[in-house]
Amino acid sequence: KNQVEQSPQSLIILEGKNCTLQCNYTVSPFSNLRWYKQDTGRGPVSLTIMTFSENTKSNGRYTATLDADTKQSSLHITASQLSDSASYICVVSAFEGGSYIPTFGRGTSLIVHP
Amino acid sequence: DAGVIQSPRHEVTEMGQEVTLRCKPISGHDYLFWYRQTMMRGLELLIYFNNNVPIDDSGMPEDRFSAKMPNASFSTLKIQPSEPRDSAVYFCASSKDTGTSGVVETQYFGPGTRLLVL
């Protein structure tokens, strides 16, 4: 069964600090992995998309890594800001039988305190 | 571009009533997705379309749910009859086609419709 596990479930950090969110998956056949940021009351916003051959991808202060061998991904946030407070969702997609099949993590809730 | 537009933003209805959610994707996007999000289950993909054709509706919970995309700029998700357990936030998202099978471009989500079924 395809699964995506995210950790920690929630995280509180001080403004300016760095943090790393984890995503472990058992999805096959692997197509791509995405990280989304979802602010409270809004739809998710894509941060990064990585395919099998990509190890790292950055989007400003966000850097995602992918280890396809161990089936792990991380999202590193540098110099956190209050606006980084949100839920971060890892989505791993398979492509099978002509269909795109996403498996969603439950998300990590990040709170950045001043 | 205004982004993905969803209506209504909020819907409160009574059990047994029909509910219709509407979505206008970003112009030029080939894919349209309907998602449901709850605290208990997180985000779930219900159905998605490519060039107005439903590709996979295996996520649709039951026959009470139906979705249509009559043209490239409009889609509906209908629940009939609605039940309290359908209460959730329903998101519509759209994306371009990458041209590579199985890899879709960045999905742009709408603001969601918050549905409460009493």
Image (cartoon, coloured by chain):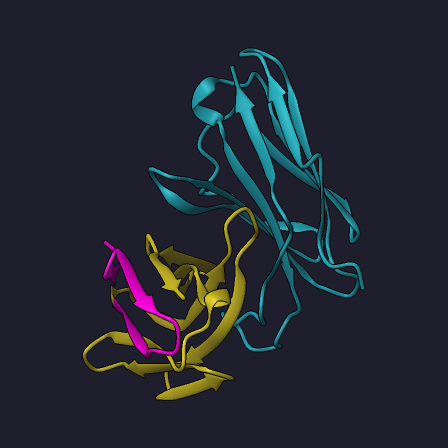
- Name the residue at 37% across, 60% down: A111
- Is the residue B86 above or below the residue A41 in the image? above
| Left-right relation of B116 to A92 | right
The foreground one among A113 and B1 is A113
- Name the residue at 46% across, 19% down: B84
Please tell me whether residue A21 belongs to the stretch shown in magenta: yes
| Left-right relation of B61 to A45 | left
- Is the residue A66 above or below the residue B108 in the image? below
- Is there any visible trace of residue A48 in the rendered image? yes
- Is the residue A31 above or below the residue B32 in the image? below
Q: Considering the image in quadrants, where does the N terminus of chain B appear?
A: bottom right
> Which picture quadrant has residue B31?
bottom right
Task: From the rendered image, report the letter of the chain displayed in yellow.
Answer: A
> Where is residue A33 shown, x and y percent of the image?
40, 71
| Left-right relation of A12 to B28 | left
Highlighted magenta segment, given as a residue range: A1-23
> Where is residue B34 shown, x and y percent of the image?
57, 46
> Where is residue B94 shown, x and y percent of the image?
65, 58
- Is there any visible trace of residue A98 in the rendered image? no
**Number of residue marks:** 0
The foreground one among B114 and A92 is B114
> Where is residue B90 shown, x and y percent of the image?
56, 40
Task: From the rendered image, report the letter of the chain displayed in cyan.
Answer: B
The foreground one among A87 and B67 is A87
- Furthest-front residue in this view: A114
- Is the residue B116 above or below the residue A111 in the image? above
Please tell me whether residue B99 belongs to the stretch shown in magenta: no
| Left-right relation of B31 to A51 | right
- Examine the residues drawn in magenta and state their main secondary structure: strand
